Amino acid sequence: MISELRKKFNSEFKQQTYDDFLNELNSILKYPTDFRVSETPVFLSAEFKSKLENACDDIITQLRKPSFIDISDAAIPKELKIPNESDHPEFLQIDFAVCEDEKKSLIPKLVELQAFPTIYSYQYYYSKVVRKHFNINENLSPYFNSPNEISYKNLLQNIIVADSDPGNVILLEIEPAKQKTRIDFAATEELLGIKELCISNVIQKGRKLFYKNEGKLIPIERIYNRVIFDELESSKAKFSFNYKDDLDVKWVTHPNWFFKISKFSLPLLSGKYVPECYYLNEVNKISDDLSNYVLKPLFSFAGHGVDIDPTKEKIISIKDKENYILQHKIEYAPVIETPSEKSKMEIRMMFLWDKEPLLVNNLVRMSKGKMMGVDFNKNKTWVGSSQAFHFQ
């Protein structure tokens, strides 16, 4: 991290400035933030930025190998496999913990990865508002391979809307107004002019999909998909279209990729940025001491079901072991100076994939607890969602 910028920010910090920042962030769009926003952005050093980019390159090279692509098909449950899969996902995120190596140098370690959209549009608004309220060097940017806000917006437009009229593009979710990331849906509507739509409001006629707007049927050409389809299967949501049909629609990203590039991928990856990871059903002998491992369900989202202190008894009792992984525990380094104890951080490197995967933005989560979640950071400050800035 850039220590002089951290010291400057901390010395200039005022609670009223943070409150004003939050008030604007929660009022500029139709939904507020439903998650904690940290008091500070992060300032990446050139050295650590380079390490992050190298780690991303290494992992993406592995993801693109024919051997990985062949194996990844097995991740899709047969009952959830959807036709017309794309050659690659349009969205890709790689999450890294910031750790220390044996020489006490900072190093990124892979936590998870996903071929499913994160809050791309919200991060656009976050960077604008945080700059307005805090004194951030004008030469710092949250973007990669995209020099400014305009080019970033154009990249999103090209991926999500492409050549369609925005009125024929929808952001699809299960009851979007009730989702924790709904501020991103509002940001996407504002930024790109597309409509958020509950899956229950989609109408199917043959191979075509429609939605109603002021009583008129509007054809759907592209779906910016925010529905997690295994969750849809277990939800009580009522909808009338069959997403397993051969539909005349472009999925962005196609739902199959949610499974293909996911926690399922972790045991297939290797290298200095990747902690050891195993499919639970392939672990021949369960150790009595699991203090250095984390148990994760394969297809949960947002940290649901992760057990950071698994026991041998619990693992033996799991009947569907093929749906779990055992990952070597990652030790986060306390790297962000705050007015009290240091914060740990996790950084999500955000890609858009047209012809090639392109790193464009980032998202940071800060924690002072055992994990990066609300439950582990209750009554703590200088934790939560943020963004990393760096010199271009």
Image (tube, rainbow, N blue to C red):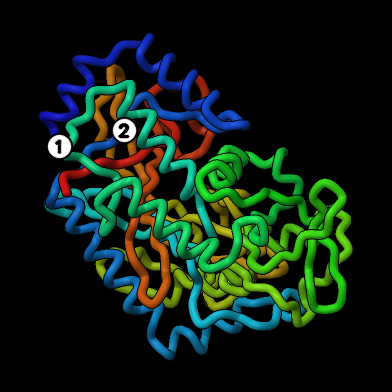
Residue type (three-letter) at the residue carrying disc 1: Ile
Q: Secondary structure at mark 2?
A: loop
Relative to 104, is 127 above or below? above
Where residue 365 appears, as percent x and y from the top left, is 41, 40
Q: Is residue 187 above or below residue 31?
A: below
Question: Which of the two residues, 349 or 275, is positioned nearer the viewer here?
Answer: 349
At 73% from the left and 74% from the top, the residue drawn is: 80
Identify the residue position indicated by label 1 in the image: 2
In the shown orientation, is residue 234 left or right of residue 35? right
Image quadrant occupied by the N terminus: top left
Q: Is residue 294 left or right of residue 12?
A: right
Q: Is residue 230 left or right of residue 148?
A: right
Q: Let me know if residue 312 appears in the view.
A: yes
Secondary structure, mark 1, is loop
Along the line of sight, the residue nearer the viewer: 67 or 356: 356
Q: Residue 169, how many percent across, how many down? A: 64, 60
Q: CA distance from mark 2 to mark 1?
A: 12 Å
Pointer 2 residue: 41
Q: Quadrant of residue 350?
A: bottom left
